[in-house]
Image (cartoon, rainbow, N blue to C red):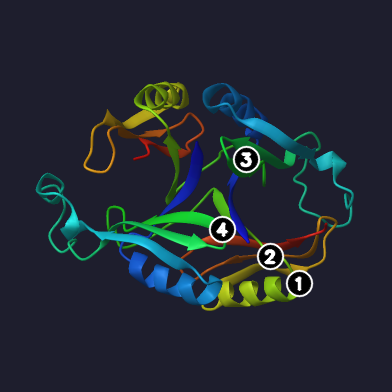
Amino acid sequence: MNIQPYLSFEGRAQEAIDFYKGAVGASVNVVMHFKDAPPDVQAQISPGMGEKVMHACIKIGESDVFVSDGQCGGKASFSGVTLTINASSDGEADKLFAALGKGGQVTMPMAETFFATRFGTVSDKFGVHWMVLNPKK
Amino acid sequence: MQIQPYLFFDGRCEEALDFYKAAAGAKVEMLMRYKENPDRGQGGMEPPGAADKVMHAAFKIGDTMILASDGHCTGKPKFDGFSLAISVKGEAEADKTYAALAEGGEASMPLTKTFFSPKFGMLRDKFGVNWMVMVAT
């Protein structure tokens, strides 16, 4: 049994996937567009959604993350959740933090804490919240 | 490099952990309260009256580690823009997991056969966390 976070980008999924490829080295395992769904599913979607992402699975490090355009509402909103990304060195943590923050907003700048040599929080340009850390061993 | 979802329960974290223990067999691996913060009193983020609240917890469901906190302890957790997708082995386990997680919550899409899974359903649990339950194929 395993669990994956599933993020809904409401129309910007492809853009987000491209951003995470560059920022955190995401690789794309699966992308399925609404137009590729069986006819009974397509009958339920709104016009213009065909090219949007119904389901995608991207891999960041060793973790799978699911992505969709959801209802294609146009405005993604993320609350109550943060994605924690564990780096293996301070250098890697700094690099990931800077890349994820590009066009977004730093909510807590990188600093040493009692549990990590580097720890910071940032909201990326899609509104997804991230914690980047290099945990103390 | 690993990514873990971090959920903010805003005062109901311990209640949520107990619920996930029973509903999904969660095992709590670590729990730290605000009063146990080694940097306590140094301008940290402890909300007033939150000494006994959960600053950080880690729990495992199946093979996946999930992090949780009471965060700002506003009393009202709010989850938006994401789901946790839980993949189980068989249809019986899907039924059991779905029913347990939905108790006190809301069945947004009852379990049904889809083109990608023999059983798939969505629900919002009583804390507002959205789940997808599916039999992995």
Which residue is tagged 4? A62
At label 4, which amino acid type do we have?
A: Glu
Label 2 residue SS: loop
Whole-percent x, y for residue B91 in the image = 35, 26
At label 3, which amino acid type do we have?
A: Asp
The answer to whether mark 1 and mark 2 are in CB contact below 8 A is yes
Q: Which chain does the residue under circle 3 lie in?
A: B
Residue drawn 85% across and 46% down? B37
- Real-space Cα separation, disc 1 to disc 4, in angstroms: 19 Å
Residue drawn 44% across and 49% down? B82
At label 1, which amino acid type do we have?
A: Asp
Which residue is tagged 1? A90
Residue A87 badge = 2
Which one is earlier in the sequence, the residue at label 2 or at label 4? 4
- Res B50 visible: no
- Real-space Cα separation, disc 3 to disc 4, in angstroms: 29 Å
Residue drawn 41% across and 68% down? A17
Residue B10 badge = 3
